[in-house]
Image (cartoon, coloured by chain):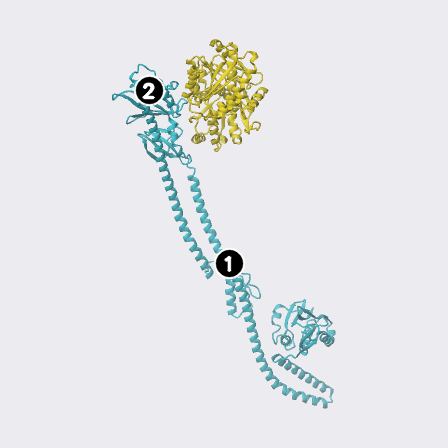
Chain colours: A yellow, B cyan
Amino acid sequence: MTWMKRIQGLCLAGCAALSIASQSVAQGQPVKVGCLYPLTGPAGLFGRDSSVAIQMALVHIRSQKPAGYPELEVIIEDTRSKSLRSEQIARRLIEEEKVDFLCGVVSSSVARAVSAEAARHETFFIGTDHASPTLTTEALNPYYFRMSNGTRQSMLAGAKYIRESYQNPDKPLSIAFIGPDYEYGYQAWDDLREFLRQEGVKFEIAGEYWPRLFETDYSIYIQQLLDSPADIVVNGHWGLDLLTFVKQARLSTLFESTQFMNFDAGGNFEILAELGNDMPLGLVLSARHHVNWPPTDANRTFVDEFYEIAGRYPSYAAQGAYAGILAIAEAVKEASGMSDKEAIRTALENLSLSLPEDPDGFSSVMDPTSHQLLQVQAIGKTIFNKTYKPASVLIGEWSIYYPPQTWPTLDSNPD
Amino acid sequence: MLSLGGRCLRLKLPFTRLNLARRYIWGALVVALIPLALIAGLYDRYSANLLNNLVTNRVESELEATAAKLDNFLATQVNRLENIVDLPDTTAFFANHEDSDLRPLLADFLRIETESPDIYAIELADIDGNTLQTIPSNRYREKPDDFSTLPLVQHGAVTILGPVLPKNNRPGWFLISMPVKLNQETIGMVSLRMRLASLSEQMSSLVEPNVYRPHIVVFDRVRLSAVGTAAEPGIETAGSRQFFPGWKIQLVKGRDIYKEPRTYIRYLLMVAAASSALCLVYLFFQLSERLSRNLQPLSEGARAVANGNFSVPVPEDAPGELGILARSYNQMREQLGKLIESRIDVERRAALGNMAAGIAHEIRNPLTTVSATVHGLKRTEKDAERLQMLDVISSEIARVDGAISELLNYARPSEPEKEHVAIKEILQSIKVLIAATAYESSVVVNISGQSNLVLLLDQAHLRQILLNLALNAIEAMPEGGHLTMRAYRNKGSAVLEVSDDGTGIDDDTKAKVLRPFFTTKSYGSGLGLSITNLLVEANGGTMQIESETGIGTTVTMTFPGVDTKRGKS
């Protein structure tokens, strides 16, 4: 596959932009998709995994072409997790490359800027990896759709998990929160508190801490958590931040003295692979996709194919990107082309996709109001499992939470 | 305890008695302990002060370094703010405030500035404080409820408002503002809404939760922890200079988990030192006691010798030189005892010799005359009764003569004329000689041993020795018994044993039995065994008597080595 080699070669050279297209000649203009991912920097793995998944999605779509799927041309740009750079790239993709869709974006704050830019140009933006609920609530615009579970779903499942596993009728649970100091972290904590109240869990806040995004030294925060002992420490970090936090916290007694939980990104394979034997056991983690759940053929095939291409197992970003490209193809097919944006929107709002991360008998469904894809959330505990090396600890002892019929909304201000 | 008669001296010493050994040992202990105590005390004092000084110096230097970091952090932000304020586009924005849009270049520049994780937003406000623009726009803020009570510091052109502590589940912040001027007139304000934790995190190097915690204190009424949260007041242990007017760092006491272990360790060390000193005292006491125990018998023994008692040995089990000294002492005591004994014996015999010579001269000559007269009377006497009486006189004269001979023998024994003597023949002749007496006393006589044993000694002396011992043995068995004479070779020496199973003698008697004129019998001169011993010694032998009351007696004589073949010795 020459185009795959091209991708890998370009990525190794530190490329800023990639262009992927199906080899077959399309009838008419192919649908142009401009994807924004960090391919370098602290969140670079998310972008690189997304690129591989986009290739896989394109191969899949090409194989489905007789069913009427369109030709897609995907351009991938390296945002380096910079907000203004992302905004400028988005503008250029829209104005110069004339893309029909924007997709991707890992950081919620970057996504918000890109979403605003996309809306200004009436271009659809298919979010694949960022998770703050702001974009599907107060900052929602008609051109934005998200193709993976957000923090609100993670936190709803997390609140249910806490109610089922840790609620103490005799005294309120003591919960401390630590998360990145930006919108994603704030929203995750707001949502969790509200859902805990909705679930009837009595709790009190032992502390709230906000280290900066991409912090490298968590020692004073870990010390603060140890000084304000809590029954549960909910962590809102993702990617390299979470990796650094766990590495530093395992040198202290934090994991022994409290129950550590991360419902949105903690179970990402990237973390498990990087930590290997250093990943503590018994942590409650989840992610938007798992290599070992659901135990379906579709998921196993997706994980194995990804491994064949990339030489590593996928982080959850891959599944989001895969879903995003499939969603675009599905919507264009349903709308019979790009000419009618209203039809595209309608198709996206009524989208139902059968994805590798869906358990048997369930398909991911778009909530037409919030433009948020509704998916199953699986939460588990870290256990020894060397099936997917280099990770030697995976998630197990699963608790499965199906999404509500409609996108959950907050009844009131949490405070 | 001091025991005599072959038992060793064991003394219970009074503790208060200061002998030389004790004085030396206790003196050494005092000499060792006093400097040790002095050095330990001085060291403890010095190290405690050193630690305190080190900690104080370190804390002060770290406080200063951290204050400089905070100073620098604020200066960097002020510089950043100046760059914005000095832009013509910024001035233009405020000058044409009816046009609320930012020029694209300025907007992008401000966006880049807000990508710093330390800055939440940049606010552009008019001179009345009304916010005209917030970059990024989605980070617009409401005016804080406590706006009017927030600390406000103006330093030069810079104003700092805040800090606003974390609330409503959002982190804290503070505002650094600078005016935008046109023709010396303020036309607006640019503010950086700063992440509060970015400032407080600068104190991370000061976090030592087990000793102290750093706080940023603003006007003594707002107190921040290193993670930017509100902090509880505590006991202040140190403080920095003001890194911004009204803003300073304060160290408050932490858990101080080291203090208790430090005190505990100090006490532990003191107890250990005291225990060591006690152990040392005990050790020295034991040493002193042991040395005294070993020296005291020597001292007592020497005193006993001075009093003429040579029979008190001292124990030889003392270690090292003391053991050697004890052994040498015992050797010296024995040799001295023998020397004195021998001297007494020589003098006694000289005296006896003179006396015996006198007696022989004064008694024997008249006795010879009496004996010759009696002999003449007997030849002419016909009366049987008188003849019997004359026989008695002759017999008694012979007995007196025998006694005088014995006395002379003891005082002036004849020099031995040594020759090779076959012991077998001597024993057999003695057996024959005593056979009648033994028979009368119901004593069975046995002789045994190596029949070819040959001795080099005076044959007459040997006969007298054996005869004396054999007759003594028969007399010791009034109820009958067994007399055994045995000769054998032992390690090149010839051993002769004369043993009986008669009445035996006790230890006290045994000690005196070789003295002249000592006898347990109602008759006899008491010189038999003394002469026997003299004859043995005159022939180069030694004699030992072993006896037990009721069991019997064995006299063992050892003579210098001879071969079993005649003439080879």
* The quarter of the displayed image where residue B50 is located: top left
Give the image location of residue B174, x and y in percent.
35, 25
Q: Residue at x 42, y 39 (%)?
A: B259
Exactly how many numbered labels are in the figure? 2
Q: Residue beneath label 1, please?
A: B290
Report whether mark 1 lies on the same chain as mark 2: yes
Disc 2 crowd rating (10 Å Cα; few below 14, some 14-19, many 20+) is: many
Give the image location of residue A331, x and y in percent.
51, 12
Q: Chain of mark 2?
A: B
Q: Chain of mark 1?
A: B
Q: Is residue B387 left or right of residue A152?
A: right
Q: Residue furthest left?
A: B184
Q: Residue at x 38, y 41 (%)?
A: B54
Q: Residue beneath label 2, please?
A: B124
- Tell me the kind of residue under disc 1: Arg
Q: Quote the CA–CA distance across marks 1 and 2.
A: 96 Å
Q: Is residue B364 left or right of residue A188?
A: right
Q: Is residue B361 left or right of residue A53?
A: right
- Tell me the kind of residue under disc 2: Leu
